[in-house]
Image: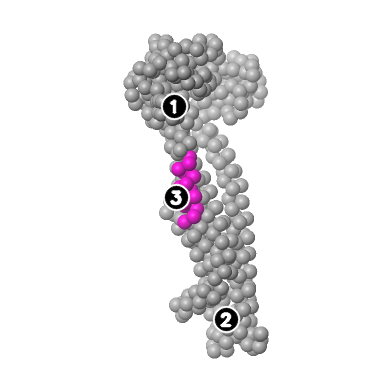
């Protein structure tokens, strides 16, 4: 019997190719959008989670201003005094600060602008940055020290042709940063995002002289001691900084967040974005569902006499309902196969574009469960969309059906 259902369904599709094709189109666009958005969202979620796992849960990020993601506010800054206050706070293992600026860089008469990172290069301070990413390693040459007043390390893109410069910078080459000449003594391996990979690394005192920032930090990173709760330590740091900077609670001109809090913040933002995008894809699916229902209603009208004949020769109500439910389910499954394939291809194309832009750490997550889930969803969606027309067909009076012209 099941075999007959499928045979009749495929025969109906062949006789109504254009209508079936248009119905498939309405559904597979929505499925393709869902697969694309979910694979991208899942990939981005994995990327963020992996980054914060590498960073470790014991890190505290301290930034000037009232928002971790906001633009710097003129007149509000972190200073050496703030770093000393943080360093003396109970529960802090180590602390370091950084001066982060965009500087003019010249190499062989070609000038461009890129990020520079000035930070203490002693083992204890730099270990905090290295522990935040396993990719923070000098691949060629050596790491600079605090004594290197005229030497720098560079990101891999600075050393790569047609990236920052037409011809990549090599070990021993001279570059000019903000009018001062430096020798390149080390090149970092690929970290996976354009800012880090095109960044220039300087000892912090050199960066302070270069950008005339004798006391300011653009960011301070602290590490809590083993066994300490980072959130409790963060509260102690906040309390000490409020007292030192003479600001009241809830009126802080600085922001402190632990790794876990940052991950939660990014996760919330990502969830909202995903919800909006998936909502848009769902609208497309609803339109496709209406298309399936409309196709099934039209099919019922065209096959009213056929339904009457089937009932007259003994077909049960459940047989008629099953026939039309299988038809709508097959439409959904067919649309799902096309949609999953197109969605996967679009996702891989977007991944390639992201990698070309320099974000090599970010990959889409086209898991087998996502692809099979997309197919299952499309099949069930097709069945649900055709359920009401199928019930209507099964309840037709055989006498009236046979009389239908």
Q: Secondary structure at mark 3?
A: loop
* Residue that numbered label 1 is attached to: 166
**Residue at 62%, 78% in the rendered image:** 302
Residue 306 at x, y percent in the picture: 58, 83
Query: Can I make out residue 91 in this image?
Result: no
Residue 348 is inside the magenta segment: yes
Magenta span: 341-354
Q: CA distance from mark 3 to mark 1?
A: 36 Å
Q: Secondary structure at mark 1?
A: loop
Q: Which mark is residue 78?
A: none
Q: Is residue 69 above or below residue 79?
A: below
**Residue at 35%, 17% in the rendered image:** 172
Q: Secondary structure at mark 2?
A: helix
Query: Is residue 71 or residue 111 the one in the foreground?
Result: 111
Crowdedness near tag 3: few (<14), some (14–19) or many (≥20) residues, C-alpha within 10 Å: some
Q: Nearer the viewer, mark 2 or mark 3?
A: 3
Q: Is residue 161 above or below residue 206?
A: below
Residue 296 at x, y percent in the picture: 60, 72
Decide which of tag 3 and tag 1 comes sooner along the chain.
1
Dominant secondary structure of the residues highlighted in magenta in the image: helix
Q: Nearer the viewer, mark 3 or mark 1?
A: 1
* Residue that numbered label 2 is attached to: 317
Specify whether 255 is left or right of 191.
Answer: right
Q: Is residue 105 above or below residue 48?
A: above
Decide which of tag 2 and tag 1 comes sooner along the chain.
1
Q: Which mark is residue 366?
A: 3
């Amino acid at each position: 019997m099941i075999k007959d259902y499928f045979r009749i369904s495929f025969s109906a599709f062949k006789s109504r190719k254009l209508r079936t094709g248009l119905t498939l189109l309405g559904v597979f666009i929505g499925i393709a959008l869902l697969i694309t958005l979910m694979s991208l969202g899942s990939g981005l979620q994995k990327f963020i989670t992996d980054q914060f796992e590498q960073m470790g849960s014991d890190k505290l990020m301290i930034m000037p201003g009232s928002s971790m993601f906001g633009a710097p506010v003129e007149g509000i800054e972190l200073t050496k005094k703030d770093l000393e206050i943080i360093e003396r706070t109970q529960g802090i293992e180590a602390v370091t600060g950084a001066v982060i600026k965009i500087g003019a860089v010249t190499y062989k008469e070609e000038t461009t602008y890129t990020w520079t990172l000035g930070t203490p290069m002693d083992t204890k301070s730099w270990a905090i940055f290295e522990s935040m990413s396993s990719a923070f390693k000098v691949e060629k040459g050596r790491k600079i020290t605090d004594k290197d007043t005229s030497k720098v390390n560079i990101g891999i893109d600075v050393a790569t042709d047609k990236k920052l410069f037409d011809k990549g910078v090599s070990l021993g080459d001279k570059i000019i940063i903000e009018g001062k000449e430096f020798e390149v003594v080390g090149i970092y391996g690929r970290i996976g995002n354009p800012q880090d990979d095109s960044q220039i690394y300087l000892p912090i005192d050199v960066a302070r002289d270069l950008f005339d920032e004798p006391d300011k930090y653009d960011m301070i990173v602290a590490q809590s001691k083993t066994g300490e709760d980072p959130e409790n330590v963060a509260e102690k740091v906040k309390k000490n900084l409020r007292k030192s900077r003479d600001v009241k609670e809830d009126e802080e001109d600085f922001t402190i967040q632990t790794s876990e809090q940052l991950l939660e913040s990014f996760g919330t933002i990502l969830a909202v974005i995903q919800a909006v995008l998936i909502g848009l894809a769902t609208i497309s699916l609803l339109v496709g569902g209406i298309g399936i229902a409309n196709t099934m209603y039209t099919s019922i009208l065209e096959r009213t006499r056929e339904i009457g004949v089937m009932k007259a020769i003994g077909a049960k109500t459940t047989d008629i309902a099953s026939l039309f439910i299988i038809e709508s389910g097959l439409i959904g499954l067919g649309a799902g196969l096309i949609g999953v394939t197109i969605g996967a291809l679009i996702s891989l194309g977007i991944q390639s574009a992201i990698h070309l832009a320099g974000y090599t750490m970010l990959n889409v997550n086209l898991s087998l469960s996502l692809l099979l889930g997309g197919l299952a969803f499309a099949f069930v969606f097709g069945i649900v969309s055709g359920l009401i027309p199928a019930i209507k067909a099964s309840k037709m009076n055989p006498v009236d059906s046979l009389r239908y012209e």
